[in-house]
Image: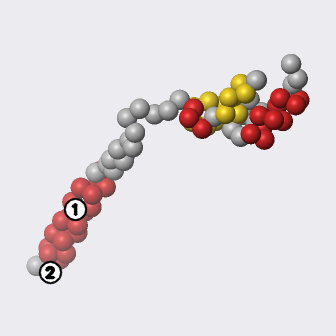
Amino acid sequence: MKFALVILAVIVLLWLLRGTINRRVKPPPATTKNPLPMLMCAQCGVHLPANEALPGRGGVFCGDAHRSAFEAAHPE
């Protein structure tokens, strides 16, 4: 009788674990519905959102230092 209870407990435990393993974790919902386009800095190649990019003579840049360095290295 004791052996049957142990077997029954193991079967119930495996059945409960099977249910938790098969559940999939849902990905978190997207924070924005309209993502911003990403632009690449003409100097270093870093991608950044379009609203943070600085326009320059040779394209867009991630910062003023890169814009100045690019324009100094590539005079008209």
Q: In which quarter of the image is the C terminus?
A: top right
Residue 27's x, y, as percent?
37, 46
In the picture shown, does residue 17 fall above or below 45?
below
- Residue drawn at (76%, 23%), measured in percent from left and top? 58
Count the marks: 2
Q: Name the residue under label 2.
A: 2
> Residue 36 versus residue 6: which sits nearer the camera?
36
CA gap, disc 2 and disc 1: 21 Å
Q: Relative to the observer, which residue lies in front, 14 or 31?
A: 31
At label 2, counting other C-alpha atoms closer than 10 Å, the crowd grade (few under 14, some 14-19, many 20 or more) is: few
Q: Tell me which residue sits at (31%, 55%) in the image.
A: 21
Q: Is residue 60 left or right of residue 73?
A: left
Label 1 secondary element: helix
* Amino acid, disc 1: Leu
Q: Residue at x 14, y 80 (%)?
A: 2
Residue designated by label 1: 16
User: Does 28 sit left or right of 2 as displayed?
Assistant: right
- The extreme top residue here reads 76
Location of residue 54 in the rendering, given as x and y in whole percent from the top left corner: 67, 33
